């Protein structure tokens, strides 16, 4: 799974767009596609629950099951705080240090970290290209990939695939190897469902589960979570 190596950001392949990749990310997330990027990022969390190695750790901590709304809000705040703070800034460094400190308490496989990070970017790309007012340009996609790799490197994640196309291949290989049903998957997914429901008045809460499953629209992933 780790045969595809990261190309350093100071290589000619990456450096030609690295200087303005952050500005492109900021424009996409804050101006061009804020709803699509946020919604797809939250759905990407569900996709990681279809991996028993990931859900086992989350189930053991019971963070989603006991504090679903708080965990959902904390994850969103941390990730988007990192996304929207420029590399080298004090704010980004503080958030990365906090995230790394939290992860250091658990034995998380490097490939699981790669998959989680990839989905936080690739799912928004897929969503925007399908449902957005226009598809992302290749320049925009490349900029997002550069930012993904920057964040992964700062988190100490090793051997991240170096391009959008190689990431798509990598994630399919990873899913084929690791995505399958486990009761922990369902427990964690239900915890997050309950957290999302708390955002809505009680009258609308029964609609949340069917809506989220419809938005995910990935039968194999849903089956792995017991839906």
Image: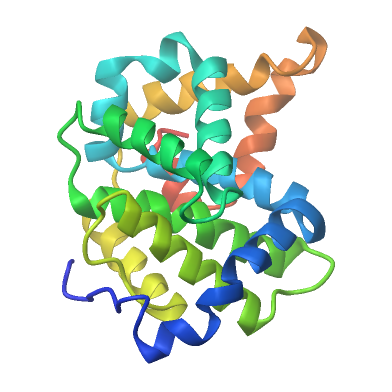
In this view, the residue in front, 98 or 43, is: 98
Viewer-closest of 190 and 42: 42
Figure disc tally: 0
Q: Quadrant of residue 56?
A: top left
Kindly identify the residue that appears in the image at 73 percent across and 74 percent down: 135
The residue at the far bottom in this view is 12
Q: Is residue 198 left or right of residue 226?
A: right
Residue 101 visible in this rendered orientation of the protein: yes
When asked about the image quadrant of residue 33, the answer is: bottom right
- Residue 136 drawn at (x, y percent): 70, 74
Residue at the spot 74% in from the left edge and 61% down from the top edge: 27
**Where does the N terminus fall, quadrant-wise?**
bottom left
Q: How is the image coloured?
A: rainbow
Residue farthest toward the right in the current orientation of the protein: 133
Examine the rendered structure and indicate whether residue 187 appears above or below residue 218.
Answer: above
When the figure is inspected, residue 129 is found, relative to residue 137, above or below; the finding is above
Residue at the (41%, 89%) spot, across then down: 13
What residue is shown at x 41% (from left), y 55% (from top)? 151
Q: Which of 74 and 18 is in front in this view?
A: 18
> What x and y, as percent, mark residue 53?
22, 39
Q: In this view, does 146 lie to the left or right of 136?
A: left
Question: Residue 183: in sight, yes or no?
Answer: no
Q: Position of residue 153 (x, y in %)?
A: 31, 59
Relative depth, front residue between 19 and 36: 19
In this view, 172 is above or below 151 = below
């Amino acid at each position: 799974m780790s045969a595809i190596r990261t190309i350093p950001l100071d290589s000619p392949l990456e450096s030609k767009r690295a200087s303005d990749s952050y500005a492109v990310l900021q424009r996409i997330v804050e101006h061009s596609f804020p709803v699509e990027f946020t919604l797809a990022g939250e759905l990407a969390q569900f996709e990681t629950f279809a991996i028993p190695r990931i859900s086992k750790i989350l189930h053991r901590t019971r963070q989603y099951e006991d504090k679903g709304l708080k965990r959902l809000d904390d994850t969103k705040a941390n990730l988007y705080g990192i996304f929207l703070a420029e590399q080298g800034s004090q704010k980004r460094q503080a958030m990365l240090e906090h995230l790394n400190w939290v992860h250091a308490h658990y034995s998380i496989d490097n490939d699981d970290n790669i998959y989680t990070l990839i989905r936080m970017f690739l799912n928004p790309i897929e969503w925007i290209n399908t449902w957005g007012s226009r598809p992302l340009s290749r320049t925009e996609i490349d900029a997002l990939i550069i930012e993904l790799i920057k964040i992964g490197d700062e988190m100490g994640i090793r051997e991240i695939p170096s391009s959008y196309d190689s990431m798509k291949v990598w994630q399919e290989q990873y899913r084929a190897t690791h995505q399958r049903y486990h009761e922990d998957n369902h427990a964690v997914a239900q915890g997050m469902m309950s957290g999302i429901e708390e955002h809505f008045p009680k009258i609308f809460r029964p609609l949340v589960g069917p809506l989220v499953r419809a938005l995910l629209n990935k039968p194999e992933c849903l089956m792995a979570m017991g839906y």
